[in-house]
Image (cartoon, rainbow, N blue to C red):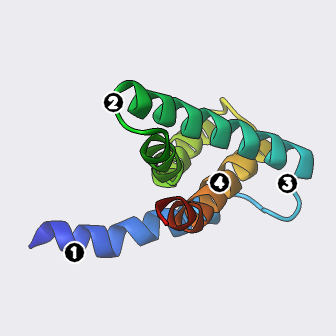
Amino acid sequence: MIKPFALNFFAPLYFVSVGLKVNFSSQFDDILVLLIFLIACVGKILGAGIGAKLGGMSWKEAWSVGVAMNARGAIEIILASVALEYQLIDQRIFVALVLMAFATSMLSGSWLKYLVK
């Protein structure tokens, strides 16, 4: 009873508070966002895809696993938030990481739908 309430009430509040920590328009760096997006996609898709292939899956199934793992953005936002709080990263990198997490989560569904056909 408490778990559904916590997930449906507190989780959205946390992500809203993360969004309020920084000004996305003034801290946006298009080259940095693109670079982080590309590195994250390649790293997650190749890492999970090659791992799935080594686990015995076909290439098509392995790439599907890689693309599905690409959508894991919530953990990235939490880690970026902690890193920003402890001043391990600046606000430009934080904005790039949050946008990357959002974009990969949004795009992975359509990519996965294409691969599963």
Q: Earlier in the sequence, mark 3 or mark 4?
A: 3
Disc 2 to disc 3, C-alpha distance: 44 Å
N-term mark: 2 or 1: 1
Residue under pointer 2: 56
The residue that label 3 is drawn on is 27
- Tell me which numbered mark, 1 or 3, is placed earlier along the sequence: 1
Q: Residue at x 75, y 42 (%)?
A: 38
**Amino acid at circle 1:** Phe
**Mark closest to the chain's N terminus, 2 or 3:** 3
Helix, strand, or loop for circle 2?
loop
Residue topped by disc 1: 5
| Distance CA(mark 1)–CA(mark 4) | 25 Å
CA separation, marks 2 and 1?
39 Å
Q: Front-most of 116 and 70?
A: 116
Q: Residues within 10 Å of mark 3 (few under 14, many from 20)?
A: some
Foreground label between 2 and 3: 2
Eye-nearest disc, 2 or 4: 2
Residue at horizontal 13 percent and vertical 69 percent from the top = 2
